[in-house]
Amino acid sequence: MKRLALLLLLQTIYLLQLSQALPHYLQDPFENAHHAEAEELLYDTTQRWMSAQSVTSSCSSCISALQLVKSLSYTSESLLVRTLTNVCKRSKRMSPEVCHGVMKEQAPIFRKVIRTMSVSGREGHLFCAAVGNSCPYPDVEPYTVTFPKEKPADIKQPEPSGDVMTVLQLSDWHVDPDYQETSDAICNEPICCRSASTDYSNVTMPASKWGEYTCDPPVRLVESMLNYIPSVEKNISFGIMTGDIPPHEVWSTLPFMKTERIHDSAYALLHTHFDSKDKINTRLYPAVGNHEAAPTNNFPLSTSDIPSEQNREYLSLEWLYTALSKNWNGWIANDPDFYVQTTTGSYATRPVEGLKLISLNTNFCYTLNWWLYQKPTEQDPNGVLTWLVEQLQESEDLGERAWIIGHIAPGDSTCFHDYSNYYHQIVERYAPHVIAGQFYGHTHADEMQIFYRGGQQEASEAISVAYIAPSMTPYLHVNPAFRVYKIDKKTFEVVDSLTYMANLDQANTWTNEPNWHLEYSAKDVYTSPAAPSTETSPLTASWWHSVTEDMESNVDTFEKYWQHRRRFAPNAPECTGDCRQHTICNIRAGKSELRCDYDPDSFLRTSERSAKYLDRHSCGGNFEPISPTY
Ligand SMILES: *[C@@H]1O[C@H](CO)[C@@H](O)[C@H](O)[C@H]1NC(C)=O
Ligand SMILES: *[C@@H]1O[C@H](CO)[C@@H](O)[C@H](O)[C@H]1NC(C)=O
């Protein structure tokens, strides 16, 4: 009797320590029978989640799955990794190796964070909405960004000079040093064209010398692009690189030195081309992408509960910010401001007189950055938004223009609604008189996003445009591309946007080099009676809004945008009806809460959703997969 009472007491203390009641099978986590039971329950729940037929059941099974993971998070890290790996393997959505690698890298961070989350409350619902596309998205928590000064009433817009300079934008290289010609372009890993994922006795589709639509590109393709650039653009004033240099090898980014080496060799190549008089010969200003980190996506906050073990220090990403500032040496002036943001990788500099360039690490709004789910969630993670306001206020005071560059556009489906809402307030305050341009990447698609004053989606109220540049990588089913802007030398507004590409589906016919060529000039292609322009007029936000109106009434205009998104890659899915409406809606959604990706009335089952993921660039295909990719 005494023993029983003691046992009960110990058990109560144990449960109290965990500060929540655990399911009985987890009370002794080190007993194998219990592992099996926990795994079984988690597997069943995720299967229910994946096959849910309605928002209600999808949301509730997502929350249940999270609850189980939270319970498991109080057991050992190795047990959590093992259970999640087994569940992943059994659901056969990824190869065993990928399941193991992803869980081993990502689960320790998620384990720390989920313990703080209110799973049945806001954080759980936010996770299931943003990552699983399962629950209705929680409303934005109201937060008014404070500004040092009121917006001036008498804003004088500078007059265009009519004289232009050239700026180059590179984005989303995802260069793969392990790319192998003749390896299999079809495999069951997130990216293919590698020896490790090839059965050479049975190759379904041998990889070309230059790349494949299911793979990240070989170094050779990147080099050919860098060689081609100065042959068409002889006088580039400066370049921007909007993030994501490493490949989508999300299951194996560690040890961090491996990812660091990929950065080092990519930047060595970039320096060769940008620092040489007979090559591109200018400075390059980079931004930090989600794949820059190892483990992928996870940029911690100063408040993050980083596991304190000796061999986990790399999770702070200090190594990354140090490596990047070393690699960026020679391009970014020795500006003391640069060092202000060594914990975020953001910086501000002046590439030419009269223009401030603000490079923002927008991974602090990324829905797959687990650190951001830690409760209490932060409205201004690491103070980046406050810093942005300071930078823009300084530019307003000095009467200079500013550009914002970054990887994930705040209007993207993968940027939290809350952050996007707060960022939008900043744009409304400082555009159009200070902010003359915004440049992003991340989606691999060639896209636009328009910001409006006072929530009025009209040409007269459009105040800023974010250009989302096409990717270098052909992954997934897009043609490799880069972008050049013609910029008014006085206003620093975009006068034209020129996209260059190569048709990867013709790779087997290329004799020496890819067929790099001009894909289109935005001004040429989108100018119409509805959206008139002159040779020197800027492509303003109002002009772009008029283009979207033209897309609504003119199928041909929409079709051009639709084809440009993937650079005429073959097998483009059709986009009519709702798809067209949603695509136009997304262009007008400078604020991510305004997007039309999530529509409870046309709820898609997760199984259909994962099929969509495979062709992510199909209609409304902005669903994020369950696993960390892109
Ligand atoms: C190159 O462009 C800069 C900036 O627009 C201009 O000042 C310069 O004269 C140009 N140089 C040549 C050789 O065209
Ligand atoms: C070859 O690969 C295909 C597709 O991956 C598969 O269906 C087929 O069974 C394989 N054949 C052999 C002999 O392994």
Image (cartoon, rainbow, N blue to C red):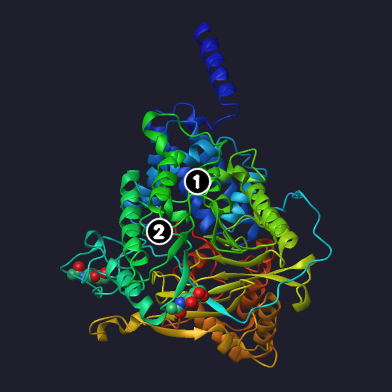
Label 2 CB less than 8 angstroms from ligand 2: no
Q: Which residue sits at x=29%, y=67%?
A: 218
> Along the horizontal axis of the image, is 615 left or right of 558?
left
Amino acid type, label 2: Arg
**Dot 1: within a 10 Å radius of its alpha carbon, few (fewer than 14), some, or many (20 or more) residues?**
many
Q: Is mark 1 within 8 Å of ligand 1?
A: no
Q: Secondary structure at mark 1?
A: loop
**Is any atom of residue 202 visible in this view?**
yes
Residue 217 x %, y %: 33, 68
| 555, above or below 386, in the image | below
Q: Measure the alpha-carbon separation of dots 1 and 2.
A: 26 Å
Residue at 50%, 66% (x, y): give it: 443
- The amino acid marked with disc number 1 is Phe
- Residue with the most extreme top position: 2
Q: Quadrant of residue 248?
A: bottom left
Q: Is residue 137 visible?
A: no
Observer-side mark, 1 or 2, equals 1
* Residue 468 drawn at (x, y percent): 54, 69
Please state which of residues 130 and 220 is positioned toward the viewer in this rendering: 220
Figure quadrant of residue 105:
top left
Above or below, 15 relative to 501: above
Q: Residue furthest right?
A: 153
Identify the residue at horizontal 67%, vertical 46% (top origin).
379
Identify the residue position indicated by label 2 in the image: 93
Looking at the image, which is closer to me, 610 or 43?
A: 610
Which tag, 1 or 2, sits closer to the chain's start? 2
Q: Which residue is mark 1?
A: 299
Element marked by disc 2: loop
Where residue 508 sits: x, y (%)?
Answer: 25, 83
Q: Which mark is residue 349?
A: none
